[in-house]
Image (tube, rainbow, N blue to C red):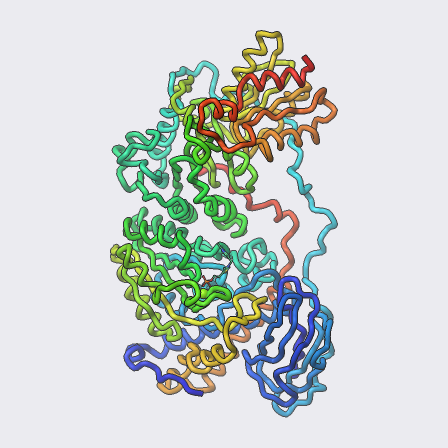
Amino acid sequence: MATEILMPALSPTMEEGTLAKWLVKEGDTVKSGDILAEIETDKATMEFEAVDEGIVGKLLIAEGTQGVKVNTPIAVLVEEGESADAAPAAKAEPTPAAAEAPAAAPAQAAAPAPAPVVDQSPDWPEGTPMKTMTVREALREAMEEEMTRDDTVFLMGEEVGEYQGAYKISQGLLDKFGPRRVVDTPISEIGFAGIGTGAAMAGLRPIVEFMTFNFAMQAMDHIINSAAKTLYMSGGQMGAPMVFRGPNGAAARVAAQHSQDYAAWFAQIPGLKVVMPYSAADAKGLLKQAIRDNNPVVFLENEILYGRSFEVPDLEDFTIPFGKAKVVRQGRDVTLVSFGIGMTHALEAAEKLAGEGIEAEVIDLRTLRPIDYATVIASVQKTNRCVTVEEGFPVCSIGNHLSAYIMENAFDYLDAPVINCTGKDVPMPYAANLEKHALITSDEVVAAVKKVTYR
Amino acid sequence: MVRKPAAKESTSNVSRDELLKYYRDMLLIRRFEEKAGQLYGMGLIGGFCHLYIGQEAVVVGLEAAAKEGDKRITSYRDHGHMLACGMEARGVMAELTGRSGGYSKGKGGSMHMFSREKHFYGGHGIVAAQVPLGAGLAFADKYRGNDNVTFAYFGDGAANQGQVYETYNMAELWNLPVVFVIENNQYAMGTSMKRSTKSTTLFGRGEAFGIKGEQVDGMDVLAVKAAAEKAVAQCRAGNGPYILEVMTYRYRGHSMSDPAKYRTREEVQKMRDERDAIEHVRDLLLTGKHASEDDLKAIDKEIKDIVNDSAEFAKESPEPALEELWTDIYAEEKSA
Ligand SMILES: Cc1ncc(C[n+]2csc(CCOP(=O)(O)OP(=O)(O)O)c2C)c(N)n1
Ligand SMILES: [Mg+2]
């Protein structure tokens, strides 16, 4: 049967092209792979190969013709002894046999508005006995409990085993679980982040420790492109149930390359969950939750907080759900929203403000993806003012995002513009006095609150 | 047509059924890819589409050494790997056309397909990312204590990425059961190997990490199979990774929009005429009197039907429902 050869699309953007040159003539026998013609696309001159075998019955478009639309018949291929006129009438444009798409997507492009349901239920039952514990101990306990609970959980990273952890978070885990489950790696961030992600795709639950998140920049590709996107790209067939954890943000006097808060970077990525705890109880409950979660979780710790002590519930097992912020301090005059070490400044500022008769409500977001918008909005509806507090850079910060969200969803409740208190827009300097100025302080938060309360 | 005579030693122990299977599997890939190229030309497939034509013997030879449970992972040039490990032509083609009947429901496209059932772990668009991921798959099998092996395929261009060497180091350090398969088709887009490295071999780079390897003629499926068996045996026995540098050639451009001005038409034609892997097996079948021209014609027809059926399916399968935009971003909450 005669077949038509159609003008091909030879690039992702080509709609028409020039038939620059025929490399076959009528009567030639061609087989699959033979070059039929040279075609100029919007980008380049391309060779066009035959797919079927046959005899060139007729060339329908002359050499040099410009503006030949994609899918126009350009030649007819016939079989031995057949005439070119036997070609079927040109078929209609092949249009996708798609279900007619409704004009608008069912969900809006922007994140759907939150159900205005605020969950401020207690994280553990009333009357639970408490014990005092550092964030460091809390994190270690969380890993120990989860590794005991589930054999597929393992820890890998630099110095996590024999050295007992660069920041001693994994102290004792090698002794307890052995080298199969506490894996010391060479200094190869992209390599071991990729190996961890592959192991997760195969169903294990790796905890990949970065000595600090500054070094995770080397591994960014696997966190974003491999771990976060696989579930979507595979149509739900497989994902990466794993945790990337380690200290994030400024430590003290370690200068520009070792002092950066990456919260806003990771929080932008669909497919990741992002956690940044402040207290030891949250560190423990959220890390346990992160290890059990079936998605890649970026768990941002803080070196300065590691040694701080908090009250932690003395329970055999407890987890804290993601997407549930915590109102740490009640107040009616202004809402302070923070997370991670930013909470130190927010709480300090609230204390100072209370001395001046301003009652600040302090919200610890705890997780940045998902974000508990409902709790923030409900508080702003009550206080009508909001200041966000974080250590990261000011441009495209978490505070910027919250400001936009509040403006869109609680505009009528605002009595003043939202102010974002952030780190300064400079690389972290080494000099003690400069470093102090680069970081956010509680005095800056106090000043911002006075501005939004017009005092 | 001048063809090299088939190497005697590699053919002596091969059964008729085996040869026919390789012929069929390679032909399916070639015809499938030709059809994909055609559908691309018709605008039914969009974006990037990297064809495997010319390289068929690599994956078919490797798969001949695999057993159930073994895993595979590769780059964006992945259609051949999927067909060779038993994934359905329909599902692959429908993914290429971005339809709901595709392996990723149309959300992955040519470069991103997966099959849990066939232990196919993608389909990766970032050059060399699949190398540590593949070692991670092998890590999981070693952790579980089974004897599965992972095949991690990557190109000569990918071999210049740093993460490959981080992976070599850890794979050998931890004795991971992974076969690194370098598909050396001699070009990374428009950059020939000569223009990207002074190394004369790529497998040799493993030596620095203590990994054994060898170069294999990738236009000879039997040579690939023999080397694969050796590599796999070493991995299965718990002796750590192995590198196979499989010398091959892609006939088509890097992707559909590559004008391929970096090599001559004669160079391509010479490979096609003298070294074609499918013609090679065809010769073995005919000269060994394992099959007649008619037998092979029947196979050609069978393959053509499968490919045409997949194309029909891929055209008729509906586009994904718009709700799919918002699904598969997160897996349900917690582990059991
Ligand atoms: C990290 C990265 N850099 C660049 C690219 C663009 N790119 C895609 S394929 C390719 C060439 C790769 O060649 P090779 O590894 O030899 O594989 P082949 O295409 O020959 O199969 C390049 C540069 C990419 N996808 N990822
Ligand atoms: Mg290449």
**Percent position of residue A278, x then y:** 47, 24
Q: Which sits in the foreground, A310 or B205?
A: B205
**In which quadrant of this rendering is ligand 2 seen?**
bottom left
Q: From the viewer's perspective, tell me whether residue A416 is left or right of residue A344.
A: right
Looking at the image, which residue sits at the far bottom?
A81
Residue B28 visible in the picture: no
**Percent position of residue B76, x then y:** 50, 60
Residue positioned 55% across, 41% down in the render: A269
Depicted A413 relative to depicted A97: above or below: above
Depicted A376 relative to depicted B170: above or below: above
**Percent position of residue A356, x then y:** 60, 7
Residue positioned 58% across, 9% down in the render: A354
Q: Quadrant of the N terminus of chain A?
A: bottom right
**Percent position of residue B70, x then y:** 36, 58
Q: From the viewer's perspective, tell me whether residue B283 is left or right of residue A123.
A: left
Q: Which sits in the foreground, B83 or A32?
A: A32
